[in-house]
Image (cartoon, grey):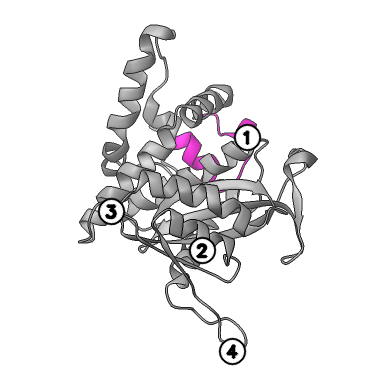
Amino acid sequence: MPEPRPYPSDLSDARWELIRPVLEAWRDARTPKIRQPTHDLRRIMDAILYVDRSGIPWSYLPHDFPPHQTVYGYFAHWERDGIFEQLTGTLRRLSRTASGHDAEPSACLIDAQSVKTSANVRLADQGFDAAKKIAGRKRHLVTDTLGLLLAVAVTAANIHDSHAARPLLAAVATAHPTLTKVWADAGYKHAVIEHSATLGLDLEVVQRHPAVRGFTPLPRRWVIERTLGWLMQHRRLVRDFEQHPHRSAAMIHIAAIDLMTRRLTRENTPTWRDT
């Protein structure tokens, strides 16, 4: 029987080698506590990337992948054990070094994006963003100056940017003590600036000129706006389909892993326009 043709989202050999050590170390640490694994970790990760990239429900996974219950089980375990955050951090440091930067950033950007939710998301986990006229959830992202993900938090859409920013910046400052500078938009004023100062961070608000109309890239801020555009190439992120906010954050980490592995191996990311 011939080998099945790979999907565009499948990991190449070079991309798999970047993430294989982390996943195998996780499996080796858990093997005494669970039954002997029967599925290939690479195919499990391919299936998760397929869901993230194509936007399908888990139960619609093609049959040449492991059973969807198994794939989702691994996804849930990896999310709970922080494997996606670990991979994001490892790949970000490799990407920064490959680009000629220090492994740890000295500056970052923060922004938020409101998205609609699907019908399976509880009403208690949703809200209405009056500014964007969107009922759903809000993603709060922190990236470095290359647009690579540092941290993400998912809240109801009615949570103001400034309220979510304080614990998120505190977590980022603890995880990355080399950070000294933050750029943000006008939604992060007053209390956020004061809170950032207590963390040793200089938060600068990049203002849009009042005379400018329409879309104009703003200094520094365009970097994180581009990151949000990168995420939208993953159809699972165009709308929030996850029942739990922490699973939504995991899907964003998976998209970042996809992007950074391609960046490190110089493989093109196929877009829907290319096809």
Which residue is labeled 3 in the image?
A: 95
Q: Which mark is residue 60?
A: 1
Front disc: 1 or 3? 3
Say whether residue 218 is left or right of residue 61: left
Quadrant for the N terminus, please. top left
Q: Does the magenta stretch include residue 58?
A: yes
Name which residue lies at 42% across and 8% down: 33
Q: Foreground mark, 3 or 2? A: 2
> Residue at point 35% right, 51% down?
260
- The alpha-carbon separation of the residues under discs 4 and 3 comes to 35 Å
> Which portion, as a residue range, is magenta?
46-63
Q: Seen in the image, is 101 located left or right of residue 184?
A: left
Mark 3 burial class by Cα count in 10 Å: few <14, some 14-19, many 20+? many
Residue 55 to residue 143: above or below = above
User: Closer to the camera, 91 or 177?
Assistant: 177
What amino acid is at disc 2?
Answer: Ile
Mark 1 vs mark 3: which is more N-terminal?
Answer: 1
Percent of width and height locating residue 185: 54, 70
- How far is the residue under mark 3 from the one under mark 2? 29 Å
Count of numbered marks: 4
The location of residue 157, given as percent across then percent down, is 70, 53
> Which mark's residue is nearer the viewer, 4 or 3?
4
Within-10-Å neighbours for mark 4: few <14, some 14–19, many 20+: few
* Mark 2 neighbour class, 10 Å CA radius: few under 14, some 14 to 19, many 20 or more: many
Residue matched to label 4 = 212
